[in-house]
Each structure stands twice: as C-alpha cells, then as structure tokens.
C-alpha cells in the first residue's frame, strides 16, 4: 500500500487503495468519446493509470494502439487487446518511446504529493 493511501472493497486492493473487482465492474464513461473526437484515427496512446481497462477497451475497439500502464498487475490482468501492458508506478515510468497521445484520467486526484498536482506544459 502506498503511504497515505488505503482502500476497502471486494477482492484485491491496489497500492493506491482501489478495489480491483470494483474497478472491473465500472461502466464506460465519456472519456473514449472525448479522446476519439480529439485524436487522429489509429494514434498510439499511452494510457497512464489504466486500471482494469474501462477506457482502454473502447479505445482498442476504435482502432487505437494503446499501451496501458498501471501500478497494479492485478488490474492489468483484466486489460484486453492493448498493444502492451506495463506494470509500473507512473512516477518512475521510462519506456524509451514516443506516443501520439498520453492520457491520465484519475491518478492525480488520488495523490497528496504536491509535485504531481501542478500541471506542467509540454515542450
């Protein structure tokens, strides 16, 4: 468990306090539609904090090449169709490749680290 994080729920709890079974049951929200409207068809997407694939799966179905990253191997076991899955904390991620798009849907709301709360412009 990450310092400052805790969680409850059915089954395995991830280091940031999420219940894997619960996240696997969540329905798809508007994120895939928003991404599809803003991103060129067939783009390579780095999805940080992918969880069990709630956003990954519809993006893959729409033809995007998604690399799904999550700290929890148990979450990534539920991801289907991604080009690649990577079990790693995103703060130390170094893949050595470029992507057309990087998404990060919710990790920042789960952290108390002020260095991650500040947004930084991309070069």
Image: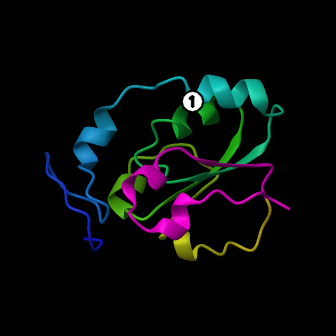
Is residue 121 highlighted in magenta? yes
Tell me which residue sits at (48%, 54%) in the image. 108
Looking at the picture, tell me which residue is in the foreground, 75 or 110.
110
Colour setup of the view: rainbow
- Residue 86 visible to an observer of this rendering: no
Tell me which residue sits at (78%, 55%) in the image. 99
Tell me the quarter of the image containing the N terminus: bottom left
Tell me which residue sits at (56%, 43%) in the image. 81
Instruction: Identify residue for label 1.
Output: 31
Query: Would residue 33 be found to the left or right of residue 8 on screen?
Result: right
Q: Residue 50 location in percent, x, y? A: 49, 49
Q: Which residues are magenta?
A: 99-123
Tell me the quarter of the image containing the C terminus: bottom right
- Residue 114 visible to an observer of this rendering: yes
Looking at the picture, tell me which residue is in the foreground, 121 or 97.
121
Is residue 8 highlighted in magenta? no
Q: Residue 118 location in percent, x, y? A: 59, 60
């Amino acid at each position: 468990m990450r310092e400052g994080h805790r969680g409850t729920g059915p089954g395995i709890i991830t280091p940031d306090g999420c219940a894997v079974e619960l996240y696997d049951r969540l329905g798809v929200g508007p994120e895939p539609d928003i991404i599809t409207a803003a991103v060129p068809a067939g783009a390579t997407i780095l999805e940080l904090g992918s969880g069990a694939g709630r956003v990954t799966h519809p993006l893959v179905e729409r033809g995007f090449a998604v690399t799904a990253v999550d700290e929890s191997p148990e979450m990534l076991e539920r991801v289907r169709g991604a080009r690649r899955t990577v079990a790693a904390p995103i703060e130390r991620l170094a893949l050595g490749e470029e992507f057309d798009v990087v998404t990060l849907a919710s990790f920042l709301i789960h952290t108390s680290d002020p260095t991650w709360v500040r947004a930084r412009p991309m070069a």
